[in-house]
Image (cartoon, grey):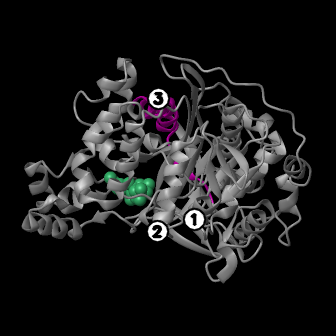
Amino acid sequence: MGAAYSSCSSLSLAFPTVTLYSSPITTSSQSYPRSKPKPFSSTIDKIRNTRFLEPVKIMAQTPFPCSGLAVKCGKVEEVENQEEGTTRKPMVDYHGIDQVLLDEMVYDALVWSSLHGLLVGDKSVERSGKVPGVGLVHAPSALLPMPFPENQWRQAVDLTPIFSELVDRVSLDGKFLQESLSRTKKADAFTSRLLDLHSKMLEINKKEDIRLGLHRSDYMLDEQTKLLLQIELNTISCSFPGLSSLVTELHRSLLNHYGEVLGLDPKRIPGNNAYGYFVEAFAKAWTEYNNPRALVMFVVQAEERNMYDQHWLSAVLKERYNITAIRKTMAEIDAEAELLSDGTLLVGGKAIAVIYFRAGYKPDDYPSESEWRARLLMEQSSAIKCPSISYHLAGTKKIQQELAKPDVLERFLDNKEDIAKLRKCFAGLWSLDDPNIVKEAIERPELFVMKPQREGGGNNIYGADVRETLLRLQKEGTDGSAAYILMQRIFPTVFQTFLLRNGICHKDNAVSELGIYGAYLRNKDKVIMNDQCGYLLRTKTSSSDEGGVAAGFAVLDSIYLT
Ligand code: ADP
Ligand code: MG
């Protein structure tokens, strides 16, 4: 999802954003024109334009006077840039920040989050995942942005449209998807159901002329080699396009106010308009569907404490484009949906133009046959699915591993430069068919991560458990091993950080994972959108293996370019 971060000021976000990049990033083979943004007219835009136009002023209204702060806070020092070897740029020793200043910043960050909708449902309040406005708490976030080298940031941005094109091409090769996942099918019941759905679509020769992908490619920066290595490519239910944009604004706002005393420049935080782009993608897809009465449908979980991230998208879609989005669970869709003979999907009697999945990616989302019926009905319809079953399967970990094999990318992409760029970011990926790798992983389990075909965090196997699981699978000698892939473990650079959770600031050492969102929309041969569209930085304590924010391991963060 493409690189025009600058367009956030005119497209959607009304904060006084500072722009680092103003030209859309394109693949080396194609350039994709961007449409003219609509003028502001919405309530949300107005609120953000007027009430929060000057974050610095808001800060000044907090109970803590900001002038006359001890300048000893935040030891500012010049460090050598390891990439270039020559440029010297300022870095802050976050843990050296004066306690009084720290308390002020924490207070300001909590106020800012509450006033600007950087919120999630509070676990301790029972109805917080069901009823909006009940039991809100600030989203877990880092207090200050994480240093990230500009070269690798640009590299990640540059890769995005190439990955989106790759997903599209892979999705069209039904045979490749079925064959690559055939052994996994035997070992994993959930993947098997998804593949059955996909087979049914192949049997009826279902064509998706209009294809919408809202992806996120996640990376870690390997400390030793300084290589940007891909963790995974998400093609379904990529979370935080709403809140990640806000956390960027939070950090810019803090640095507008405290940057001088910290020795940090807010302009070094790249703008992040993820939700503006997501909404633009929905609106463009809706236009392609060409039924002015049709709605966008968000497929959601019955309980969702991350609902505000989703509501940012639907609210802005309504305000900016006057397109209505409804929220339905899979069970509700099963009860209320019908398919007309021309393929139109009606839900509660209303035609659906775009289906956006924020559920349906894990077994828990299918507690009964009802949910599978709903998924099938949606897949059979002419509505634009984000994602279709083919896009969903193209984002599985097994396909990631297959694509990393020699000569496989060449089946899908023509441009050699693009192929080389993708390959450069692939970490070591193996199936468990390879006895040498399995032997190595048993001997040195700390160098590997073992991954089942699951999404949403908390499913991977690390350390001694890798050895134990591999030995057990060897003993059992069945197809069980086909449920997993092995991946080289990446060891990112550890930085000092402050993590804000539940109103408490935790001082810790942390590592980060950078996700770049990508929007891809095409109608037959016409590529309407293929842009990078904002980013998500998740930061977790360095002692934690897993990384999900919703799963409770990480916090939302933004990047400070070094
Ligand atoms: P999920 O679909 O559950 O998000 P991921 O592949 O993204 O699965 O893994 C979850 C988390 O585990 C990541 O966010 C990251 O923190 C950690 N992780 C995954 N792969 C690696 C790896 N190769 N090296 C180090 N950490 C990893
Ligand atoms: Mg992940």
Label 1 near ligand 1 (CB < 8 Å): no
Label 3 sits on what residue type? Glu
Q: Does the segment drawn in magenta span residue 199?
A: no
The residue pinned by badge 2 equals 368
Compared to 269, does 87 lie above or below? above
Q: Which numbered dot is residue 10?
A: none
- Alpha carbon of mark 1 to alpha carbon of mark 3: how far? 33 Å
The residue pinned by badge 1 equals 331
Label 1 sits on what residue type? Ala
Q: Which range is magenta?
A: 144-169
Label 2 sits on what residue type? Ser
Q: Which numbered dot is residue 165?
A: 3
Residue ID at (49%, 46%) = 79
Marks 1 and 3 in Cβ contact (< 8 Å): no
- Alpha carbon of mark 2 to alpha carbon of mark 3: how far? 34 Å
Secondary element at tag 1: helix
Residue ID at (46%, 69%) = 367
Residue ID at (39%, 51%) = 194
